[in-house]
Image: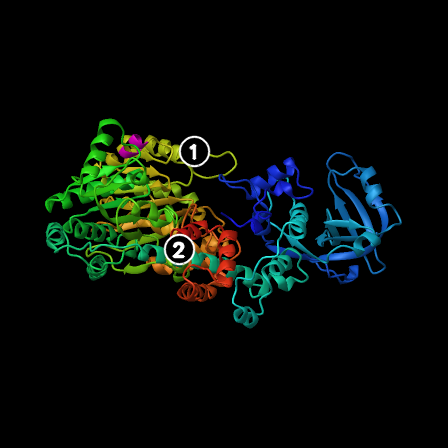
Amino acid sequence: MRPALLDPLFAPVTTLPGVGPRVGALFNRLLGTPEHEARVVDLLFHLPHSVIDRSRRPAIRDTREGDIVTLTVRVAEHRPAAYGGKAPFRVLVEDGTGDVTLVFFGMTQARIDKMLPLGATRVVSGTIAVWEGFRQMVHPDRIMSEEEAEGQPLIEPVYGQTEGLTSRAIARAAQAALSTRLPALPEWQDAAWLAREKFPAFGEALAALHRPESVAAFAPESPARRRLAYDELLASQLALALMRASHRKAAGRVNAGDGRLVAAIEAALPFALTDGQREAVADIRRDLAEPQRMLRLLQGDVGSGKTVVALLAMASAVEAGRQAALMAPTDILARQHFARLEPLARAAGIEVALLTGRDKGAARTKALAAIESGAAQIVIGTHALFQEAVAFQDLGFAVIDEQHRFGVHQRFALSRKGDGVDLLVMTATPIPRTLMLTFFGDMDVSLLKEKPAGRQPVDTRAVPIDRLGDVVDGLARALERGARTYWVCPLVSESETIDLAAADERFADLTRIFGPVVGLLHGKMSGRDKDAAMAAFQRGETRILVATTVIEVGVDVPEATIMVIEHAERFGLAQLHQLRGRIGRGSGASTCLLVYKAPLGEVSKARISIMRETEDGFRIAEEDLRLRGEGEILGTRQSGTPGFRLARLEEDADLLPVARDDARLILERDTTLASERGQALRVLLYLFERDEAIRLLRAG
């Protein structure tokens, strides 16, 4: 139960003065989620992203184009629109050193007479522009009498907005929340650490950012901002440490057998394992031989051979007489894993079953019976595996593929299906060290950096979209050589508002040119249609597969050697790297064409440049973090992933190791968080909605 102390913060924003149902609906659009409407805590954690500094009060003659200024002026002249209609209404104001024209579109004479009566003195704020050699200010932000200006803050916070909800309205609501809903919270941080860093109290830090007294409050190094970032990072690291402690505390079982099945599978492989794969298998078998439960991350770049390592690890558990399960994020990926791994497992005498949400009727009943009886020694599936109806005879080892697509807590749902289950998590998204600590701080890590022997580097080129005809001509020549091609589009069907290529439309275009060798695959298709499209491409019946990013993770067709990514400027670096990883998986030379629409912004230019320079996913991940920040780097945020609101990892990365060490020390000294600081830290965990960690404390 969340402590009653926090109830005012978790109340809906509509409990704030001045926020009725209509404005509340706008806040829901801005800050709400499918799980809950916008709450006071969401508003307070929606920090301003910048400020307007109105402390500059120059004379008109000292202003320059682009300056945000506050001027004290006399209203000299009204200049109504000469021809009515859409021409602007202009008002000339002056201060003895010069003049500025205030420009208003769509405003009535009566309203302007009221705001700016001739001869009156007014204080106006806004941005200076220059038009035809004269200073002007289009739609000033503020127009006030001298008396009104006295009470206005000189530093005004600027918030991310949604249509119908202005930054000023958000600021008013945030002020009301600070004044009426922010309780006095116990101090959860170490006193010596606070003093050393000169951090204010939590409430003071929030107030300093919502009521800034200077531009410096928003500097990356400002004590208030860093204090809030550290609070959020500590909550995250403490939750991860509690999860690790809980996982380790539960009794484990020895899950490594004699190695005979592992040897049989290795003998059946058509290639030799890389050194990295051998090391990872050895790491996992060492963990499985221990009585503590394993919690390990296997991180490998695209095409580094993680799936084979997972199979050899699962075979180790089968040798010990237990079952193993592999959970993939999508139906396509689960079926592909099954198609690749089942023949290898069968060669060693291991029975493999497949279970996804699409399996119905007799097939589902048969799979469930095989899992429950133990006849299915390895089970491959989607999140359907942790549904209530699925009962394992003796699950001892679970593999979760592409962990970040499930969320931090969901990995435990599968491990609860057995007794002392060892857990291996895999990701093909190379993760910078800072994000590694954030998402996987509770895990041991094995890295696969090499690619299997025989893989060729991918030739990556950037092509402006006006040369699309050349791309299609090149494709025709490649088809004659028997090549297979992915053509990736960012949307499924044409949007009226965004000028992006659509998979449907591109499929129609390419079909007109090349005929029935063109296939289509996107997320809105039924599961059976997706499978059929993928199977046709794998068999070579279709040789160009037009797709959305549904092919981003795990899809493996070694014969595909060309990747066209249309509107490459719209994709993140990590996503471009994952898509490129779908080719270069066989022994043939491969080419990736990044088709972009000019002119490119600085970030898009940098992304494309990095893609052309390197195939090293770990370097790409670091660059992606630098260019974009943590928000998008692991793809769509899921419930249970950090999704930081106050911390910015590109600026606060140095605080992560400190938070991790602090969390470890806290739990060494106070395992159940029972001390005075421990009780305050429980409040911190609830405040940042790490409730799962508190449940683990209660269970322990």
What secondary structure predominates along the stretch shown in magenta? helix
Q: Amino acid at mark 1?
A: Ser
Q: Nearer the viewer, residue 697 or 359?
A: 697
Q: Is residue 610 above or below residue 20?
A: below
Percent coordinates x, y for residue 572 in the rendering: 42, 50
Highlighted range, magenta? 527-531
Percent coordinates x, y for residue 554 in the rendering: 29, 46
Q: Nearer the viewer, residue 617 or 458?
A: 617
Q: Amino acid at mark 2?
A: Phe
Q: Is residue 246 visible?
A: yes
How dense is the environment of label 2, judged by Cα within 10 Å: few (below 14), some, or many (20 and up)? Answer: many
Q: Is residue 517 visible?
A: no
Colour mapping:
rainbow
Q: Is residue 662 left or right of residue 461?
A: right
Q: Earlier in the sequence, mark 1 or mark 2?
A: 2
Q: Is residue 118 left or right of residue 198?
A: right
Percent coordinates x, y for residue 211 in the rendering: 67, 57
Q: Measure how far apart labels 1 and 2 are at the Cα level.
A: 34 Å
Res. 588 mark: none
Percent coordinates x, y for residue 264 in the rendering: 10, 51
Residue at the spot of label 1: 493
Q: Is residue 179 left or right of residue 462?
A: right
Residue at the spot of label 2: 439
How dense is the environment of label 1, judged by Cα within 10 Å: few (below 14), some, or many (20 and up)? Answer: some
Determine if the magenta segment contains residue 528.
yes
Q: Could you say whether the residue bearing mark 1 is in a helix, strand or loop?
A: loop
Q: Is residue 576 above or below residue 667?
A: above
Q: Could you say whether the residue bearing mark 2 is in a helix, strand or loop?
A: helix
Quarter-of-image position of residue 96: bottom right
Quarter-of-image position of residue 472: top left
Determine if the magenta segment contains residue 146.
no
